Image (tube, rainbow, N blue to C red):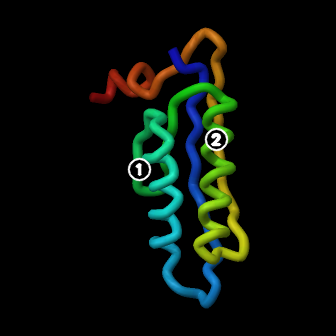
């Protein structure tokens, strides 16, 4: 069972003030390609896995955004860590 939930909102600066959504889409592609369980929400994406694995995905997201031309990125991150296990499904099942 996973021990960490990590929610991230990336706020990339764009080179010429253009729309940031294509950059956010690139960041989400990195998450999708990582294979970690995730859920895309309107204002952030939540990932489930091991803490080191998820932090590596965050690093790769930032690298992808820089490679796409973003001169800087701010990420707002929330981490819930429980060595005994944690899951998105368990935390939200009573609302579904």
Pick the residue in front: 81 or 34: 34
Q: Is 94 situated above or below 52?
A: above
Q: Is residue 12 above or below residue 4?
A: below
Q: Quarter-wise, where is residue 38 in the image?
A: top left
Q: Toward the viewer: 78 or 31?
A: 31
> Residue furthest toward the bottom?
16
Residue that appears at 64% across and 18% down:
82
Residue 90: image tag: none
Question: Who comes first in sequence, dot 1 or dot 2?
Answer: 1
Mark 1 is surrounded, within 10 Å at the Cα level, by few (under 14), some (14 to 19) or many (20 or more) other residues, namely few
Q: Residue at x 59, y 87 (%)?
A: 17
On the image, the x and y values in percent for residue 83 come to 66, 13
Q: Give residue 12's position: percent from left, percent from top.
A: 62, 69
Instruction: Name which quarter of the figure residue 92 lies in.
Output: top left
Q: Which residue is mark 1?
A: 41
Q: Secondary structure at mark 2?
A: strand
Vertical relation: 53 (above or below) 94: below
Which disc is residue 78 wearing? 2
Frontmost residue, 9 versus 36: 36
Q: Residue at x 49, y 81 (%)?
A: 19
Q: Quadrant of residue 62?
A: bottom right
For the C terminus, which image quadrant? Answer: top left
Total count of labels: 2
Disc 1 + disc 2, Cβ < 8 Å: no
Mark 2: few/some/many CA within 10 Å (<14, 14-19, 20+): few
x then y, percent, for residue 15: 64, 85
Identity of the residue drawn at 41% across and 42% down:
39
Identity of the residue furthest to the top in this view: 84
Gap between marks 1 and 2 measured at Cα = 14 Å
């Amino acid at each position: 069972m996973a021990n960490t939930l990590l929610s991230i909102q990336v706020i990339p600066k764009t080179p010429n003030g253009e729309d940031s959504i294509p950059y956010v889409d690139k960041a989400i592609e990195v998450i999708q390609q990582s294979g970690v369980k995730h859920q895309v929400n309107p204002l952030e994406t939540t990932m489930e896995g091991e803490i080191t694995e998820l932090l590596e995905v965050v690093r790769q997201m930032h690298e992808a955004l820089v490679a796409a031309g973003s001169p800087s990125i701010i990420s707002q991150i929330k981490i819930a860590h429980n060595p005994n296990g944690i899951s998105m499904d368990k935390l939200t099942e009573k609302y579904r």
